[in-house]
Amino acid sequence: MATGRTWQHERRLGYLFVLPATLMLVAVLIFPAFITLKVSVTPEGGSGWNLTLIHYQNAFRDPVLLRTFKNTFAFVAWSLVGHFVLGLGLALALNQALPGQTFFRLIALVPWTIPDVVAGIIFRWVLNPIFGCLNPLLHAIFPGFPAEFQWLSSPTLAFPSVIFANVWRGYPLVMVMLLAGLMAIPRELYEAAEVDGAGRVKRFLHVTLPGLSTIILIALALDMVWEFRRFALVLAMTGGGPGTLTEVLSTLVYKSYFQFFTFEYASAMAILMSVVLFVLSLPYIVLVGREQ
Amino acid sequence: MNGAAAGSARRERRLEAVASYSLLVLAALYALFPIAWMLSTSFKSEAEALSLPVRWIPKQPTLSAYVEMWTLRPFGTYFYNSIVVSGVTALLSTALGALAGYGFSRFQFRFRTTLMAGFLATQMISGVLVIGPYFQILAAVELYNTLTGLIIAYVTICLPFAAWMSKGYFDSIPKELDEAGLVDGASRFQIFLRIIMPIALPGTVATLLFAFLLAWQDLLWALCLISIDEKRTVTLGVAFAVGEFVVKWPMLTAASLIGSLPTILLYLFLQRFYVEGLARGAVKG
């Protein structure tokens, strides 16, 4: 089959099959990414190849950007903690084949089916200080609770409120991946451990966790990439406010570009954001690369 | 001794079940209470939504919010746009992704693995990094404010996933089928279309679903690429309704619920399938 001519022909055919997808990725993602890089080193309102690093210098001195980076890191970290704790707990509970398991799994998946914007709006309405449902609910459980608690306009509670909403929105995906990982652990391993006299905790530490470690890493790495870019939930829920207390990088770059039209500075911020995300996910990339 | 051990094991198991159920019930409450609140609000009149004390069950349930979203607001148009965009995105990205997946699965060409890694790497690109220039390009070729411009973006975003997923499926289909086709004188494209695709069809469900949901749920791209009301998608329509000076909460919650309905139903009907595909892809790395 693989005589010289047909092999050459086959090879060219291979390129042909992957060509449309490659062209689209280049045109829509890769080429614009380079344009952004170029714009980020162009003087404001300028064009051509008269390059400058002024926007990066400004960026490193910009307290709003610094604050937004801190917010984004905290947003990602707390979201990941919430997703992992809730996701692992539920995955373990759902893996026991208890009666009603399918029913609970379907319910636990529901937040995942809600678009980000809608999730933001839901929580804005839930947390409405006067007409929302959370304040009366808390007031009913804890009678001492203030009646018109200002969740989203409070400087201390706006950020945790956004995390609360984002944990709600994002835990199902982590749960589903961990559940798939749990199901893949062979039952014999548990039986062998039980024969060896290993208790519940020991079995969890020596069978479950090692069997799950790869998928935990993958789930958290993917989740980190997603949360780092989370946009619509924050925009719909707080718009970044009060002030810049809940601003994240996506919303900041979007506003600078499409609302304040500071294209060059927005591009520099987008590049910095991407570099940081790349560095953060480097361990994951190396890990996946090594496994293949 | 043995009986005592069995008894303690049984007690332990029961304790475990109780703990599991408690966690599941608490999580179910957490998952559902915001949605229950939306549902409740959507059946209220505006006056009742803004009256105290706050009620979980509407005193005078009404469907007026579900009527208003179509009459006061062009949610019909928004739905039409979302269905067109998501449907075309699902079909196109699955088709082009399958084409690429077949190329990766069946041919040995130079830069093959590099290209595959490159496909995967594009998934790391944030929307806000590329959307400005993409917007400028669309404006230059007069595709700004068109569903076409939006579809091209969504299809591209879905392509890496579609290509990798379909490559996985094609790898599991024996190559002898292709060779038999070649012997019969079929071209590679005919083999792909007539022999391999029909077998791989069940495998495309996950890709179709992924692309449809991505397009349906996105806000960022629609927000930046559409500025006229006639071309808005559902998520955009909902986002603009919340930005207004006076928010009509019953109508907004009704629109949000109806806007989430397609994704809720798709997920719940197909979740088993989707989850398995996802897990297989993830476990494989």
Image (cartoon, rainbow, N blue to C red):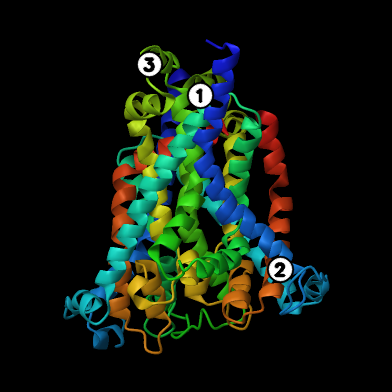
The residue type indicated by label 1 comes to Arg
Mark 1 chain? B
The local crowd at label 3, few if under 14, some if 14 to 19, many if 20 or more residues have their Cα within 10 Å, is few
B43 is higher (above) or lower (below) than A178? below
Looking at the image, is mark 3 or mark 1 earlier in the sequence?
1
Tag 2 residue: A39
Tag 3 residue: B185
User: Left or right: where does residue A162 sit relative to residue B196?
Assistant: right
B24 is higher (above) or lower (below) than B229? above
Q: Hey, which residue is sitting farthest front in the picture?
A: A5
Q: Position of residue B253 (x, y in %)?
A: 31, 73
The residue type indicated by label 3 comes to Gly
The local crowd at label 2, few if under 14, some if 14 to 19, many if 20 or more residues have their Cα within 10 Å, is many
The residue type indicated by label 2 comes to Val
| In the rendered image, residues at marks 1 and 2 fall on the same chain | no
Q: Secondary structure at mark 1?
A: helix
Residue drawn at point x = 79 percent, y = 70 percent: A56
Q: Is residue B77 visible?
A: yes
Nearer to the camera, A57 or B194: B194
**Image depth: mark 3 or mark 1 in front:** 3
Tag 1 residue: B106
User: Left or right: where does residue A68 sit relative to residue A184?
Assistant: right
Mark 2 chain? A
Q: Position of residue A291 (x, y in %)?
A: 66, 29
